[in-house]
Amino acid sequence: MNAELITTGTEILLGEIVDTNAAWMARRLKELGVNLYYKTTVGDNLDRIAAVMRQALGRSDVVLVSGGLGPTVDDVTRDAAALATDRQLVLHQGSLEHMETIFARWGRSVQDNNRRQAFLPDGAIPIYNPVGTAPGFAVEVARNGTHPALLICLPGVPREMMHLMQNSVEPMLAERLGADRVYLSTRTLRTVGLGESVIDQRIDDLMHLSNPTVGLAAHFGQVDVRVTGRAGSPANAQSMTDEVADEVRRRLGFAVYGEGDQLFEAAVAGLLRERGFTLALLESNTGGELAERFHSLLNGQDPLVWDKVIRSAFELADGGPDEIVSQAGARWVAEQVRLAVASVPDSDVVTLAVCGTSDSAAGPYGAYRGETFVAVGLGDALTVKRIDVGGVDELARRWSGNGALNELRLRLMTASGSAPGTP
């Protein structure tokens, strides 16, 4: 079964609100095993909505529309559905009575503009709305040589749309799928330290598979590898997905830091806890990238990060090298951090010093410029590495921050005897 989504609303086209409905509906369709091939947003215009509906009904088995079922003049989805399916709008008595019951519960009577909401395309199947006033509806549209297409229109209010989708639409689609229902299993491997092009080269043959499918999604400073399998049973879908996901893990080695929605800083925090370390962190001119991420993760309550040493390297500049952003500068900063934590009763402290280049005209912390030196101190050993990511924007800063965290992660893994796999 192939589906597509249409969301209506000029406010969405103008960027005044974000279309969260389409994303949520897409996830629900995925869970049903329905293929989603197209998503369209169209403004509150009768002719344009009808034209989009006609196009969708000509190429998809199911067309889901969200929005435009309210009582106001610009709510024209009902009219567009009637126009697109060559039907008349007629008063649906059951929908009107359902609406009257809801209004009576509120101590109100149905006004003429609300009464418009009970007019549906002739022959439409009503989808009663117990959490709002606008009923949804479904219309079957005949197609030559194949099964009828199904046009389903739902309210745009997220709470109402979600209720009708889960309680009415999904059972309807599952019934239509019958024995043809497909179950999906998805695993998302989260990676850091390898660029998208490098990952593409290492798993190129896997990305050409038709089932399971393998795709990449690049984010700030990291890349996700998504593996999705389809099968006639949940167990078979999971089995085939696991087989390919495990092969991806083998090829990418320690670049895979976790799965699902796990944040990279959460993975590193887990390693610190597991090894019994407290992190002493100091950053220079990277905008407090790592400190902000750790404290957001830990809500400032966890002693995992020793925040007494989270400050600018320039506060320690007296007596240091002329150029903080250098290998010698990073080493010196790390040594200062080591001295600062020497009096901490818990001796299991790992230090991380991050010194990034900046534009001094951008304020005391500067604007990140893409060159970073990272120093990691663990026990008596202190290692320094240069990270060049290029660029001057937030993406470059995030790549730099992830590079620093990755150096820390690899040192923690090596210290515990967890030999990293393929880099």
Image (cartoon, rainbow, N blue to C red):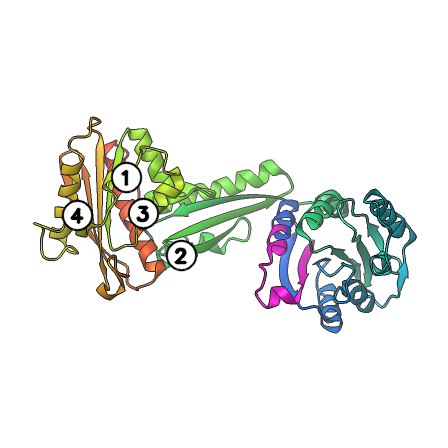
Measured in 3D between alpha carbons, the distance from the residue under mark 3 to the one under mark 2, in whole angstroms, is 28 Å
Residue shown at the point (63%, 62%) measured from the top left:
38
Query: Disc 1 designates what residue?
Result: 307
Measured in 3D between alpha carbons, the distance from the residue under mark 4 to the one under mark 1, in whole angstroms, is 22 Å
Frontmost of labels 3 and 4 is: 3
Measured in 3D between alpha carbons, the distance from the residue under mark 4 to the one under mark 2, in whole angstroms, is 29 Å
Query: Disc 2 designates what residue?
Result: 200
- Segment colored magenta: 1-24
Whether residue 221 is visible, yes or no, is yes
Q: Answer few, some or many: residues within 10 Å of disc 1's Cα (few below 14, many 20 plus, some between 14 and 19).
A: some
Placement of 383 over or under 53, stated as above or below: above
Front-most of residues 416 and 250:
416
Secondary structure of the residue carrying numbered label 3 = helix
Amino acid under label 4? Answer: Val
Frontmost of labels 3 and 2 is: 3
Mark 1–mark 3 contact, CB under 8 Å?
A: no
